[in-house]
Every structure is written in C-alpha cells, then in structure tokens.
Amino acid sequence: MIDNNDIVLVTGGTGFTGVHLVKALCDTGATVRVIARASSNRTALEGLPIEWVIGDVYDEATIKKAIHDVNYVFHVAAAYREAKISDDIYWKVHVQSTQLLAKHALAQPNFKRFLHTSTIGVHGHIEHPPADEDYRYAPGDEYQKTKVEAEEWIKDFAQENALALTVVRPAGIYGPGDRRLLKVFKMAKLPICPILGMNTKNLYHLIHVEDLVAFMVHAAQESQTLGGVYICGNDSDISFKSMVEIIASQLGKKARFLRLPVTPFFILGDLCEAICKPLNIEPPIYRRRVAFFTKDRSFNTSRMQNEAKFTCQYSNEEGIRALCDWYREQGWL
C-alpha cells in the first residue's frame, strides 16, 4: 500500500485530473513529486507538501531529476487540443515522455508500479456499443493517434522488461474544476436545445474525477491489476438527451429539443479550422467539437468492477446534478 515510506511521481499534476490525484496521494502520507512547466498554474495545490520538479515532461534531464528513488509513477500528462499546438508536441508529451519515464523507472531499485493514463478516445466511435478493452483502435486525430502509440509502446516495453504496469483508459472525465462539459450545461438552459444528427443516439460514457482518482490509486496498489488495461467509467452510458434532461431538471426547467442535420456543422467546423489554425487562433467551432455530439462512446466496464474490485461512488445522475450545483456556485450558469 502507498504510505509515508513511498515516493510517488506525478506528471500532469497541475491539470484537472492531476490536481485531484495529487491531493489524494498527499493524503496517503507518501512523498509526492510533481513535474510541472515553469508556466503551469500551481494555485490549486498551494500549501501541500509537494516536491516540485520544474521542466518539460519530455526532457530527459527533468525526468532523471524527478524519478530518482521513486516507487510509483502516475503518468497523467497530456497535450490538450489547441490550435497553436503542433503535431510534434503531441508526440513529445504522449510518446517521448512515456518512453523516458518507463526506461528510467526501470532503473529504480525499489520501483513498484507504473500507472499509465490513456483514454477511451483511442477507440473512436463505437459502432456496436458497448465496447470493452479489447475493442479495436480507431484514433481520429493526432492527440488520439499519439495516445495509441504511447499505450502500445509501454505495454510492449513492460512485457519485454518486466516493468510493473497498469493502464487506465478514462471515460469522459467531469467534476468540480471541469469546464469541458460546461457547454452542455449551458445548452440545457436554452429554450430549445439542438441535437445534431437526425438518427443519432449520442451515447456518452462518464467518470466523475473523484471516482477516477480513487480508481487510479487503487489500481496502482492491487496485485490483481498488475499488467491490466482498464476502461474507467460508470457502469452505464448516458445519452446527450438524458444529460440535458437531468441538467434542466436541476435548474428547474423542462428540456425541449430540436434535431438538426449534422453535415453543415462539419463543413463549418472544417472551414473554421482551416482559417484559424494557421493564425494560431482557437476556432469557435471545429470538427472534433461537432463530433462530440454525434459519436457513440459506450463501454462495458465490468473488468474494472469485477477484476479490479472497484465500485464508483457517483452515478451519472448524482454526479451531473452535483456538478450543475457547483457550476451555479461559481456563477458559470
């Protein structure tokens, strides 16, 4: 078990998931090191007993400094999709960092587990839901392609070199501090909420950030999760329509919907990207954002529940209602 005798290294510790993870790991009493860029916002972690290592996660000198004598690595760092990010940055943050961390972790005398964070995005659209961990890869952009490459590389490396590894593919992460789902909550306030696609199911799979972090800490310590790959999500999916209905109900409203053809929105998204990306401007609408409202992401999470022996604390409805209240407290709704 992780305790005050252990040294734990976290990458991506200043991000949404990383902040919650670092706080949970500090509660174990372990020595917690976090790699962070000089420009990272560390406000949410002020006052915690953290050993900060400043540098890029794909810089070997930074890795060597950070990983000395560590017992656990929680590799959470990710390059978020922005117009100004070039393709080589995705590769460096996802693939190169994984390679450096794994190789240097292997050299630590008392190393116990490498927790590698991937994404359900590696599976793309699920043609016949639900999918499980063995479903085919179908990455749709450079972010997902490099996530696949990193995951495949470290699984092969771990097998060839006896590196203690567990891979987690989180579903759609949400909870206090998240802004990515805020657009859905704002849509629920509209008099009529648009649904893209005339016959789409718009299935989505969620995991509350507190459940994700609890599972990551749990999976890094349990013998039955050694060598395993786990989709981390609630025990059931939820449709976009159902999400909006729950949010509207929490706001004291009744949701009303209008279905619209999706093709014009894809064309508009492509056009905005073509114009904005060369100018390093974040496009107001882009293909991936449109695809969010059309793809089905539904998974069988029984491996997490049965093999890893883990149960989520938040149901879809409980988590969505709680986040709705949190957004209102922040003045965002």
Image (tube, helix red, strand yellow):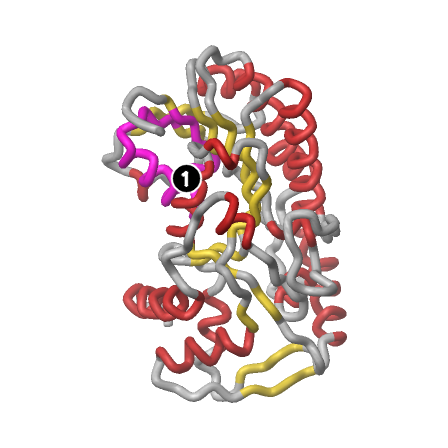
32 is within the stretch colored magenta: yes
The local crowd at label 1, few if under 14, some if 14 to 19, many if 20 or more residues have their Cα within 10 Å, is some
Q: Which quadrant would the N terminus be assigned to in this image?
A: top left
171 horizontally vs 266: left or right: left
Residue 301 figure quarter: bottom right
Question: Does residue 157 lie above or below 257 as drawn?
Answer: above
Dot 1: element: helix
Q: Residue placed at 37% from the left, 22% from the top?
A: 7
Q: What residue did someone put label 1 on? A: 218
The image position of residue 69, as x and y in percent, is: 42, 14
Q: What stretch is highlighted in magenta?
A: 8-33
Tell me if I can see residue 278 in this picture.
no
Q: Residue placed at 53% from the left, 32% from the top?
A: 226
201 is within the stretch colored magenta: no
Three-letter code, disc 1: His
In-front residue for pair 309/48: 309
The image position of residue 53, as x and y in percent, is: 41, 24
